[in-house]
Every structure is written in C-alpha cells, then in structure tokens.
Image (spheres, rainbow, N blue to C red):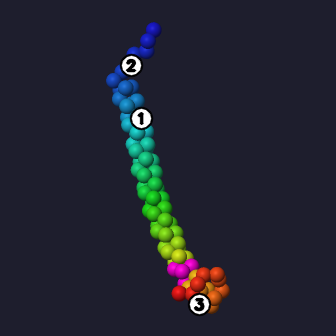
Amino acid sequence: MMAAVSNELIYDMLKQVQHRIDRVDHKVDEIKSELNALRGYHVSMQQDIHNVYGILGRYDFRLERIERRLELNDSPAA
C-alpha cells in the first residue's frame, strides 16, 4: 500500500531542495570570487617575473660591456 503524498509534503520537499540549491549557488559565487583573486595574483606574479628578467637582462648587458672594456673576456673591445 502506497502512502498518500500530499501537496504539503511535496511543497516541503521542494522548499528543502530550493534551500540547498541556494546554498550551492552561494558557495559557487564564493569559489568564483576566490578564483578571480587567484587569477589576479597569477597575472601580478607573471608581470613581476617579466620585470625581473628585464632587469637581469640589462645587468647582463652592462656586465658584458664592463668585461669587454676591462678586457676580462675573449670578446674584442668595441
């Protein structure tokens, strides 16, 4: 024998499902916000690394020029 399923029982179940979906939506929004923050941090790190490589490249160029002028390497002086 099947138990009678009333409209009230269905309504209560749908309210519970809706409540859980609302919580999931809230968590997804939190995760999206955190992911966007991580993306920003990642881009910032990439820019910093790019800047460091640029600075190192300039120092490398200057060091090579100094070595040439002091005749510390095998390259001909310019």
Task: Identify which residue, 65 or 20, lies in the foreground.
Answer: 65
Q: Is residue 32 above or below residue 65?
A: above
At a point 65% along the width and 83% down the height, the residue shown is: 73
Image location of residue 25, percent across then percent down:
40, 44
Q: Earlier in the sequence, mark 3 or mark 2?
A: 2
Image location of residue 19, percent across then percent down:
40, 39
User: Extreme top residue here?
Assistant: 1
Is-magenta flag for residue 33?
no
Q: Is residue 73 above or below residue 9?
A: below
Residue marked by disc 2:
5
For the residue marked with disc 1, what is the amino acid?
Gln
For the residue marked with disc 3, what is the amino acid?
Arg
Q: Is residue 2 above or below residue 52?
A: above
In space, the residues marked 3 and 2 are separated at their CA atoms by 94 Å
Question: Magenta: predominant secondary structure element?
Answer: helix
Image location of residue 34, percent across then percent down:
46, 56
Task: Identify which residue, 46 or 18, lies in the foreground.
Answer: 46
Residue marked by disc 1:
16
Task: Identify which residue, 33 or 67, lies in the foreground.
Answer: 67
Could you tell me which secondary element the residue under label 1 belongs to? helix
